[in-house]
Image (cartoon, rainbow, N blue to C red):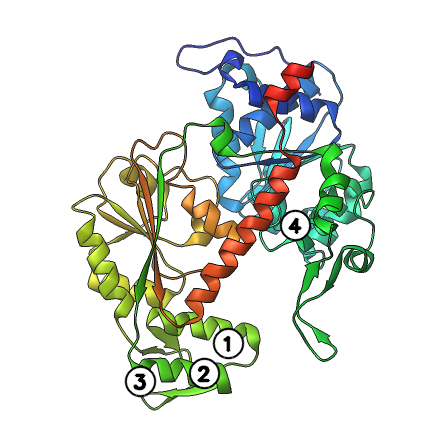
């Protein structure tokens, strides 16, 4: 690799002196730890921290030569844009290998320091691209997306993990579904050194069966003392920080708006829950298993459901009416609505004059104040979107079990740079699965908060003892 001189400071660009102390600490941690888990809340600057460390490792220490960044599809260009904002890393050359196979191959063959690929193409890169996997450093942006040890992306990356000299995992939601998630994430990072090489042994050592049906175990819960033991094992390669500790965040108001179903509507949902089948307006709605049942019940709580032929069957408009009240109560301020199912989107669009946040122009128009009511899907709002300039009110029309998507969507508005109090409304159908989802989210948040607190650095204490 031809080493280039560091970029000089240019007008309008941020330089190294603009980094916060916690960011400088994180840079040093990455440099000093060939294996590192960086658990930072949204808005703390994971990207610039990592790029700064990579810049030093490439051009000052000469400890790496070719870097692969694996990230969510929509975040690929975020890395490239970040380089353009900071003068001290502007010398880095990035190649974004996202798009068609031809485009990806061309990008991977282009001379660069850092190559960026979306996580869906990890298997393609390792097994199907015919290119040699000659990366000595791997950055996993959103480490939590590798929490499933049976996923193709996990298996593919594990095949080449022994060739990688440095690996960094970045995420703000390391245990979105509980501590069981951590095994695969750290198995990938340290190849089983801390939490073991086998999921069965990890489960046996730290968990006991929780929900079960005779011999079939549906979930596990930590043994007494297991959480502390796990935190202790990973603490030497892990740092974590909460945004509230380092950023001036706006006030946050979280609100639940309950809607009440009629007795007939409630009976329809109860029949589905009890029998895995119900009849709505002459159409038969069935659920094959517990996961399918959960989806059907969430749809029905929202007011509509897909029948067995894929057609939409209307049940009620309780949430639409509540949504109308919330929009009216915003008194003309912009409102962002999170939906989950397509039939929710269709009914929202039919009732209100809304615009979907899908493209870069949509994002720009929202932040410029040109959109009064916007709708967004949590899966597309999860990472890399800054929407805090366009409004401060978020309404969850439909809920999700995913803590990661839930927190990341909220963080689009509740983040540094937001000038107003952020209000997050949840429209909850009383006596339905909505209430269980809200309880589960609160429980998961506590588990994740405990993890982050356990390995959270305290810069003040470190300075005192230094």
Mark 1 against mark 4, which lies toward the viewer? Answer: 1
Foreground pick, 83 / 281? 281
Image quadrant in which the N terminus is located: top right
Do the CB atoms of the residues marked 1 and 4 lie less than 8 Å apart? no
What whole-number distance in Å separates the C-alpha atoms at marks 3 and 2? 13 Å
Among the two numbered marks 3 and 4 on one chain, the one whose residue lies closer to the N terminus: 4
Considering only order in the chain, which callout, 2 or 3, is on the residue closer to the N terminus? 3
Residue 4, percent from left and from top? 63, 13
Q: Which residue is mark 4?
A: 146
Q: Mark 1 and mark 2 in contact? Answer it, CB < 8 Å.
A: yes
User: Going 47% across and 66% down the picture, which residue do you hit?
Assistant: 436
Would you say the residues marked 1 and 3 are in contact, meaning their CB atoms lie under 8 Å apart?
no
Give the crowd class for mark 2: few <14, some 14-19, many >=20 residues within 10 Å.
Answer: some
Total marks shown come to: 4
Q: Earlier in the sequence, mark 1 or mark 4?
A: 4
In whole angstroms, how far apart are the C-alphas of marks 1 and 4?
26 Å
Q: Is 385 placed left or right of 466 in the picture?
A: left
Spatial separation of the CA atoms under disc 3 and disc 4? 43 Å
182 relative to 52, above or below: below
Place of residue 413 in the rendered image (x, y in percent of width and height, measured from the top left): 37, 40
Q: Which residue is mark 1?
A: 293
Residue 272: mark in rendering: 2
**In this rendering, the label closer to the viewer, 1 or 3:** 3
What secondary structure is found at the residue carrying circle 3? helix
Element type at mark 2:
helix
Residue under the image location 37 percent in, 59 percent down: 339
Q: Which mark is residue 264?
A: 3
Whether the residues at callouts 3 and 2 have beta carbons within 8 Å, the answer is no
Image coords of residue 42 (percent x, y): 49, 37
State whether residue 321 is above or below residue 205: below
């Amino acid at each position: 690799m031809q080493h280039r001189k560091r970029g000089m400071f240019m007008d309008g660009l941020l330089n190294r002196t603009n980094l916060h102390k916690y960011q400088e600490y994180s840079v040093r941690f990455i440099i000093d730890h060939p294996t590192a888990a960086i658990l930072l809340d949204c808005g703390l600057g994971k990207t610039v921290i990592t790029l700064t460390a990579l810049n030093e490792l490439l051009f000052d220490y000469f400890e790496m030569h070719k870097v692969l960044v694996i990230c969510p599809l929509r975040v690929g260009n975020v890395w490239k844009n970040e380089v353009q904002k900071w003068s001290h890393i502007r010398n880095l050359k990035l190649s974004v290998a996202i798009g068609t196979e031809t485009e990806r191959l061309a990008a991977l063959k282009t001379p660069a320091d850092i190559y960026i690929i979306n996580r869906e193409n990890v298997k393609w890169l390792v097994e199907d691209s015919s290119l040699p996997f000659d990366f000595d450093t791997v950055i996993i942006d959103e480490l939590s997306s590798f929490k499933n040890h049976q996923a193709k992306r996990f298996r593919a990356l594990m095949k080449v993990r022994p060739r990688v000299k440095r690996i960094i995992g970045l995420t703000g939601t390391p245990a979105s579904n509980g501590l069981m998630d951590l095994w695969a994430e750290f198995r990938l990072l340290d190849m089983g050194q801390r939490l073991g090489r086998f999921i069965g042994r990890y489960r046996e050592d730290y968990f006991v069966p929780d929900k079960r049906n005779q011999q079939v175990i549906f979930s596990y819960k930590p043994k007494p003392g297991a959480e502390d033991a796990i935190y202790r094992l990973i603490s030497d390669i892990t740092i974590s920080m909460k945004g509230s500790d380092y950023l001036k965040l706006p006030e946050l108001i979280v609100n639940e708006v309950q809607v009440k179903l009629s007795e007939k509507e409630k009976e329809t949902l109860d029949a589905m829950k009890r029998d895995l089948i119900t009849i709505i307006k002459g159409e038969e709605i069935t659920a094959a298993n517990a996961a399918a049942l959960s989806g059907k019940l969430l749809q029905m709580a929202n007011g509509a459901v897909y029948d067995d032929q894929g057609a939409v069957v209307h049940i009620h408009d309780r949430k639409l009416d509540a949504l109308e009240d919330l929009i009216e109560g915003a008194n003309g301020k912009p409102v962002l609505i999170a939906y989950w199912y397509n039939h929710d989107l269709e009914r929202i669009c039919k009732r209100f004059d809304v615009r979907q946040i899908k493209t870069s122009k949509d994002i720009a128009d929202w932040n410029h104040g040109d959109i009064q009511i916007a709708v967004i899907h949590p899966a597309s709002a999860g990472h890399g979107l800054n929407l805090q300039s366009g409004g401060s009110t978020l309404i969850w029309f439909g809920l999700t079990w995913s803590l990661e998507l839930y927190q990341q969507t909220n963080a689009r508005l509740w983040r540094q740079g937001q000038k107003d109090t952020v209000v997050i409304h949840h429209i909850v159908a009383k006596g339905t699965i909505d209430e269980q989802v809200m309880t589960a989210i609160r429980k998961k948040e506590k588990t994740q908060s405990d993890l982050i607190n356990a390995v959270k650095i305290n810069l003040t204490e470190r300075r005192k003892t230094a």
